[in-house]
Amino acid sequence: MNLQNAITLFSPRNLVCALFMSVLSACGGTSDEGHVVTVDGISMDKTIDKTGIYDLEVTGARNDVTVAAGNTVARLIVAGMNNRIFVLKTATVERIELDGSGNTVYVPVGFKSRISRNGSNNDVIER
């Protein structure tokens, strides 16, 4: 690598762009307000373990969210793109609402829930 290539590679614009992209790679958060838990961000890996009945809203993109065993979710609302939701055994989800695109909810074999699909390429998969 010559000096000119090194200067171009480490230019302030390239460094700012790299910093911005690294911040975006895992941004967002989880909020818990009363009976509603919201997961909103990009490329997050979250496990939700809450007592009592609650609604779970998942938005953003490429998030992996696990509903812990023994949890009771009244409404699971999945919007955004390419989110994966894992419902563990003994968890209960009364209603699954799939919006957005490319979202997948993985449930235990024999799992029962009301399901509405409003987006495209959204799936509920038993495993």
Image: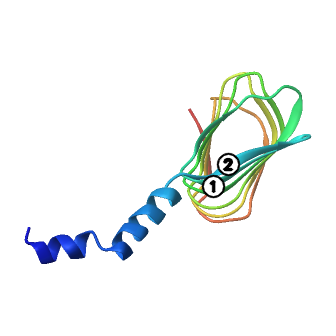
Q: Can you say which quadrant of the picture contains the C terminus?
A: top right
Give left or right: position of 38 versus 9. Answer: right
Residue type at tag 1: Gly
Residue type at tag 2: Gly
Q: Quadrant of residue 46?
A: top right
Residue at the spot 56% in from the left edge and 56% down from the top edge: 82
Q: Is disc 2 surrounded by few (<14), some (14 to 19) or many (20+) residues within 10 Å?
A: few
Residue at the spot 59% in from the left edge and 52% down from the top edge: 83
Depth check, front residue: 29 or 109: 29
Residue marked by disc 2: 29
Q: Which mark is residue 105?
A: none
Residue 44 picture location, percent across and down: 57, 46
Residue 71 picture location, percent across and down: 78, 27
The image shows residue 52, relative to residue 114, as above or below, that is: above
Depth check, front residue: 56 or 42: 42
SS class of the residue under badge 2?
strand
Residue 4 picture location, percent across and down: 14, 77
Depth check, front residue: 73 or 117: 73
- Label 1 near label 2: C-beta < 8 Å? yes
Depth check, front residue: 5 or 38: 5
Residue marked by disc 1: 41
